[in-house]
Structure formats: structure tokens, C-alpha cells
Image (tube, rainbow, N blue to C red):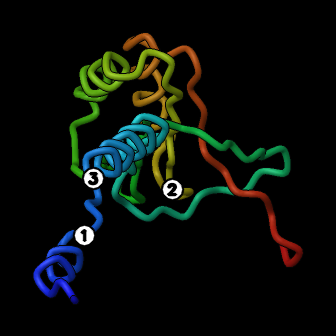
Amino acid sequence: MLNITGARKAKRQGVDLNMAPLIDMVFLLLIFFLVTTSFVKESGVDVNRPTAVTAVSREKSTIIVGITPDNKVFMDKREIDVRAVRANVERSLAENPEGNVVIVADEASRTGVVISVLDGCKLAGAENVSIAARQPSENE
């Protein structure tokens, strides 16, 4: 004799899939990628950098200060006063003590403004301050 109720019970019994380890693994991967990602802050302005034959490429620069042709200073995509460069760089260095500072100045900006920004960065405690330049192209 055929047991119909037993066959139905056997069909209802399924395989349980435990999702907890999978979710744990996804969270661990997320944390890993967040920790290993470096966040680069942009100055927020486009400038025409001067050319220099000795210009070298830097992979990491954590603090970028931009100077426009009309001598406005930008940091973190907002305009700041030249006198506030020191305080802003100090705050950024407090977040990342090993940060490099790169000054991205336009060719047409005044040298006095660039020197004031450079001085503010040095007074803030930045040990590695650079001025961005581009390498000359074949046509230049």
C-alpha cells in the first residue's frame, strides 16, 4: 500500500539556507573596503597650471589648496580667505597627520598670494608642501 501522507511530508521538507554567515561576510568586505580607501579632497577649482620640465607625478596628495587666476583661494570646494589657510590646513592635518599639501596655483595668479598660502601651510605644521605643475607637452 502506498502511503500518500508520508510522500507529501517528504516533499514539504526543504533545505534551509542560513543567511547569517553570508551577511557577516558582506559586512566584513564592506568594512575592509572602507578602511583601505583613501579619500582625496579636491580644491574645487580648475586652474591652468604652469609647466615645469622637472615636474614629477605624485600618487597621493591628501590636502589640496587651489588658487584661481583672480587670486581666490579654494579648499574642499569652498572659497576661503588667505588668512584662513593656516587654520584649515591645521584641521586637515589633525584628521590625517601624515598628509601632504599640494598648492595648485594658476599661472596667472600673483606670486604674493602663492607665497602667503605656502607660508600658511608651513605655519600649520605641514612638512611636505608642493606646488603643482604640469610637464610640458611635445608642442611647447
Residue 30 picture location, percent across and down: 36, 46
Q: Which residue is under mark 3?
A: 18
Name the kind of residue labelled 1 in the image: Gly
Query: Does any portion of residue 73 appear in the rendered image?
Result: no
Name the kind of residue labelled 3 in the image: Asn
Density class for disc 2 (Cα within 10 Å; few <14, some 14-19, many ≥20) is many
Name the kind of residue labelled 2 in the image: Asp
Density class for disc 3 (Cα within 10 Å; few <14, some 14-19, many ≥20) is few
Closest to the camera, between mark 2 and mark 3, is 3
At 41% across and 48% down in the image, what residue appears? 66
**Mark toward the start of the polypeptide (2 vs 3):** 3
Closest to the camera, between mark 1 and mark 2, is 1
Residue 81 picture location, percent across and down: 22, 37
Nearest the viewer among 90 and 98 is 98
Q: Which residue is under mark 2?
A: 106
Picture quadrant where residue 93 is located: top left
Label 1 to label 3, Cα distance in Å?
13 Å
For mark 3, give the secondary structure.
Answer: loop
Report the side of 111 relative to 132 (left or right).
Answer: left
For mark 2, give the secondary structure.
Answer: loop
For mark 1, give the secondary structure.
Answer: loop
Label 2 to label 3, Cα distance in Å?
58 Å
Residue 33 picture location, percent across and down: 44, 44
Q: Which residue is under mark 1?
A: 14
Nearest the viewer among 26 and 79 is 26
Circle 2/circle 3 CB separation < 8 Å? no
Density class for disc 1 (Cα within 10 Å; few <14, some 14-19, many ≥20) is few
Residue 119 picture location, percent across and down: 44, 20
Picture quadrant where residue 3 is located: bottom left
Query: Does any portion of residue 12 appear in the rendered image?
Result: yes
At 70% across and 57% down in the image, what residue appears? 134
Label 1 to label 2, Cα distance in Å?
68 Å
